Image: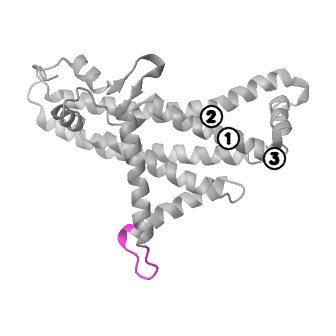
Amino acid sequence: MATGTPSPTDYINHHLHNLQIGEGFWTLKIDTVFFSVLLAALLVWMGRAIGKRLQHDTPSGLQNWVEAIVEFVDGQVSDVFPNRDKLVGPLALTIFMWVFLLNFMDLIPVDLLPWAATLVGLEYLKVVPTTELDTTFAMALTVFALIIIYNLRSKGLVGYLKMFLTHPFGPYLFPVNVVMTTIEEVAKPVSLALRLFGNLFAGELLFLLIALLSLGGFGAAWVPQIALGTLWAIFHILVITLQAFIFMLLTAVYLGMASQDLEHH
């Protein structure tokens, strides 16, 4: 990338390549892990810092903003979850804020951090963790594990297995029930992961296409590039927020369904 003007294909491939070690299944994508952990640590630090400075009489603007988010998430969880639960509310808030921060990395100019990485000798750097299937499937599989735990807690092992045999067509069609229920359960983490990945990956590609306007062969297109980039960034703010909200809400819905006993399920 440092020698001459890259072709559009080389430019896109370079930005979509991770800083990684290993090959195949054992590949470790260092940039994805780094930014995920960094933003998680930032979220924990922000929560701790705001918690230490809570003011009941004269709350600050930041405290009001945080309280509004907490009340919003709590209201959404209360609407879809049958009973109060010590885990689901904090989990939903964590998912919403963390996924939003991961998505927000997509609004940083696509060349800025990769260029900064070259200054310290790093050839590749991919900065949006949610444009990686590894990240979205890891979160979705964690939610799926919680779904199984909540099903076992509310229905018991026998009741959970009975759900596969009797849902949705009754006990006489148990072979069909097993197939249908298995597909239904597996579709939950798959849809969670692919929805988030697909929307963020598409947004990243569009930012790269807009950035291509400034490369050689496309003419001096700074004005349309800045205009298009600004318009897409404004729209993308809605996208990244909506995707964080959907991931959070579906998590609460799935856990709410898993918390019902077999009769209500």
Residue ID at (45%, 48%): 98
Where residue 215 sits, quadrant-wise, is: top left
Residue ID at (12%, 31%): 221
Residue ID at (48%, 19%): 25
Numbered circle sitting on residue 147: 1
Q: Nearer the viewer, residue 227 or 205?
A: 205
Residue segment shown in magenta: 54-62
Is tag 3's residue or tag 1's residue first in the polypeptide sequence? Answer: 1
Q: Of helix, strand and loop, which one carries label 2?
A: helix
The residue at which mark 3 appears reads as 261
Query: Could you say where residue 8 lies in the image, as x and y percent from the top left?
Result: 21, 19
Check the image and report above or below for 143 versus 212.
below
The residue at which mark 2 appears reads as 188
Which residue type does callout 3 highlight?
Asp
User: Do residues under tags 2 and 1 come within 8 Å of each other at their CB atoms?
Assistant: yes
Give the class, few, some or many, for how many residues have Cα within 10 Å of label 2's Cα (few <14, many ≥20).
some
Quadrant occupied by the N terminus: top left
Q: Of helix, strand and loop, which one carries label 3?
A: loop
The alpha-carbon separation of the residues under discs 3 and 2 comes to 19 Å
Q: How many marks?
A: 3
Please state if 203 lies on the left or on the right of 93 as rendered.
Answer: left
Query: Could you say where residue 173 lies in the image, as x and y percent from the top left?
Result: 87, 24
Q: Of helix, strand and loop, which one carries label 1?
A: helix
